[in-house]
Amino acid sequence: IQTIMVWGRLVDAISGKPTLEGEARLPDYFPVEPSGCERHAKKLFECISKEATDKARDLEKMGYAKSYYPDVEAERVKKLNDIPPSKGEGVDHSKLPKPDDNPLDECRTAIAYYKRCCDRELKKKKNWILTEPYRVQEEYRYKKDG
């Protein structure tokens, strides 16, 4: 077991820094923390709770928060196009959020390391339970009105 762990670390060191292709998204298995990935999971959770949350709040303050509902999203885009950009003096416009910013872009590196580690560690038998679906017993389910 120790040689497998060492082998994984060597492969990581040789392959270099992982890159995240496309849009920054959390993997489907998030927020699992498989044994062997505690360090990467901790860094990702800290990044999400600090940098990404701060950026999401800034986007909300500027009115750029995206919606999952198409009619609300269309209305938001229409409002953004109607408002002329302000020309504030003494403001560094490069630091202001833009309408298409993704808060998870702040954590791209942490997501890439987390994803690479979890993709490797979740295949191991000791972490299989983390990927298994589980059934919620009836007494713990919400009651249906009706």
Image (cartoon, rainbow, N blue to C red):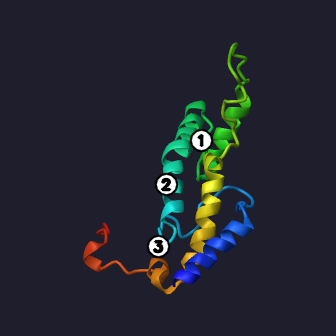
The residue drawn where x is 73% and y is 23% is 84
Query: Which of the marked residues, 1 or 2, is nearer the chain's N terminus?
Result: 2
Element carrying mark 2? helix
Q: Are marks 2 and 3 in contact (CB under 8 Å)?
A: no
Q: Quadrant of the C terminus?
A: bottom left
Q: Residue 81: where, in percent of width, then height?
A: 73, 33
* Distance Cα–Cα, label 1 vs label 2: 21 Å
Q: Residue furthest top?
A: 89
* Distance Cα–Cα, label 2 vs label 3: 15 Å
Q: Nearer the viewer, residue 78 or 117?
A: 117
Residue type at mark 3 is Ser
Q: Is residue 106 left or right of residue 130?
A: right
Element carrying mark 1? loop
Can residue 132 be seen from the camera position used here? no
Query: Which of the marked residues, 2 or 3, is nearer the chain's N terminus?
Result: 3
Q: Nearer the viewer, residue 86 or 122?
A: 122
Classify 106 as above or below 21.
above
Residue highlighted by disc 2: 45
Residue highlighted by disc 3: 35
* Residue count near mark 1 (Cα–Cα under 10 Å), binned few <14, some 14–19, many ≥20: some
Residue type at mark 1 is Ala
Can residue 79 be seen from the camera position used here? yes
Q: Residue 69: where, in percent of width, then height?
A: 59, 52
Residue 76's image quarter?
Answer: top right
Q: Residue 70: where, in percent of width, then height?
A: 63, 52
Specify the label residue 49 is tagged with: none
Q: Residue 39: where, in percent of width, then height?
A: 50, 61
Element carrying mark 3? loop
* Distance Cα–Cα, label 3 vs label 1: 35 Å
Q: Nearer the viewer, residue 58 or 3?
A: 3
Query: Which of the marked residues, 3 or 1, is nearer the chain's N terminus?
Result: 3
